Image (spheres, grey):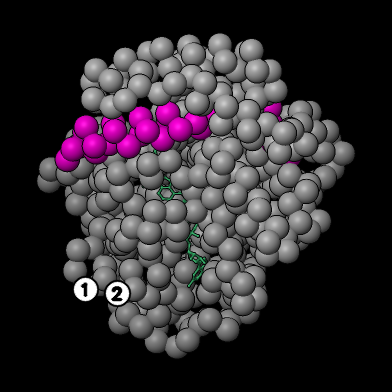
Amino acid sequence: MPALVLLGAQWGDEGKGKATDLLGGSVDYVVRYQGGNNAGHTVVVGDQKYALHLLPSGILSPGCTPVIGNGVVVDPSVLLSELSGLNERGVDTSKLLLSGNAHLITPYHTEVDKVTERFLGKRKIGTTGRGIGPAYADKINRVGIRVQDLFDESILTQKVEAALDFKNQVLAKLYNRRAIRTEQIVDELLGYAEELRGYVADTTLILNNAVDEGKVVLFEGGQGTLLDVDHGTYPFVTSSNPTAGGACTGAGVGPTKINRVIGILKAYTTRVGAGPFPTELLDADGEALRTIGGERGVTTGRDRRCGWFDAVIARYATRVNGLTDFFLTKLDVLTGWERIPVCVGYEVDGERVDELPQSQSDFHHAKPVYEYLPGWSEDITRAKSFSDLPKNAQNYVKSLEEMSGAPISAIGVGPGRDETIQINSFL
Ligand code: GDP
Ligand code: IMO
Ligand code: MG
């Protein structure tokens, strides 16, 4: 049975946490394959609200084994505090599996993230400041520290020394910061080793066996398609591949084993941090979407930038991820608008375009071309089936589906687990 990828189709915060949690009950493994604790995934179960950063959202489903794959960057202090926070609330986390090949975020990565952003000034990316970019940079530069290094003090010391050799020059000479001592980092990291040892496993082997045995494996993306380092709005992106291919490299499972790729798509658009955003609203409508949608970052508490739905982006997400389905979230937030603008194309320097412009400069100049769909005023939060939705809400969903290039198989009408209309099964 299926191996599914569930990922963000826009700029993150589409409601991936809720979608993963919803499927969690019927899934054997939920796997994070990229990113780190830059993610903020909210899951609402009954009257309990959970904010997850590094752990897969499936951790809240008792039958499900949560996995942190090799493609994730792991801040061990964050991982342990997230685990103990969940344990205090009665969540069993003992099944967690952690890839020994995952790279670690150390205090020097968070330090470099913050000073680099400060140094960039008005050109900054607006990162989450969690050390994500510098940790991935070290991975690619082959000076990263991996989870498995925690269990060999001599190797760990050599590797930290090698990483700090260069970094301390930069910190001291360029950023005027104090150098970081190797022993301080090694001592801190060794302090996490014993607590983490029991979770470490050959996750690629386990996951491939699981898929071969017909278990249901769900790969949960962090961030979103437009934040992908290859396919997003570079350089205003994160430093990993949230797109579907990232699930293969970030978990060690081949593309022939993936059956379904589900894009989580908000019924409007949000973005946190800097970078182009054609449908952004800087007016009362933007403020209303932010307030009604509760659009404030789970990780950094920053207000999210808000705008209308952008079908060009949705089509692009279908293409670069090979999406088989969409899960449309937060439809309830749009209740009350008399008519709802939807961006169907762009105007770039006087020319109409229907696809995401290839050049960054063109995308920065892209002006949305809107179509206006009739709104609805009825409360839809209790709708259980598509036919329970008012006609205009049905029409909104159908129009988005036609524009976006893949079937909308589920619709979110509220944050709770049960506030979902399932149209086609994902399994
Ligand atoms: P993620 O990063 O993609 O997991 O999304 P976040 O958790 O950062 O942000 C999504 C927010 O929307 C959370 O507060 C969810 O509880 C909430 N949410 C998810 N689906 C729905 C929905 O269908 N309706 C409403 N009103 N809220 C939703
Ligand atoms: P979830 O998983 C929204 C954004 C940051 C910044 C850029 C780079 O909750 O959808 P980074 O710290 O990753 O180097 O920052 O990416 N960003 C997110 N935006 N949701 C997220 O995660 C994000 N993770 C990173 O705001 O613009
Ligand atoms: Mg989020």
Report whether residue 90 is seen. Answer: yes
Residue 374 position (above or below residue 90): below
Disc 1 marks which residue? 284
- Residue 116 is inside the magenta segment: yes
Crowdedness near tag 1: few (<14), some (14–19) or many (≥20) residues, C-alpha within 10 Å: few
Separation (CA) of disc 1 from disc 2: 6 Å
Q: Residue 353: image x %, image y %? A: 26, 45
Residue drawn at the location 73% of the way across and 44% of the way down = 96
Q: Where's the C terminus, which quadrant? A: bottom right
Residue 426: which quarter of the image?
bottom right
Crowdedness near tag 2: few (<14), some (14–19) or many (≥20) residues, C-alpha within 10 Å: some
Disc 2 marks which residue? 288
Amino acid beneath label 2: Ala
| Image: magenta residue range | 97-124
Residue 363 position (above or below residue 262): above
- Residue 331 is inside the magenta segment: no
Amino acid beneath label 1: Ala
Front residue (pair 173, 288): 173
Front residue (pair 124, 329): 124
Q: Residue at the bottom extreme?
A: 378
Which type of secondary structure does the marked residue at label 2 adopt? helix
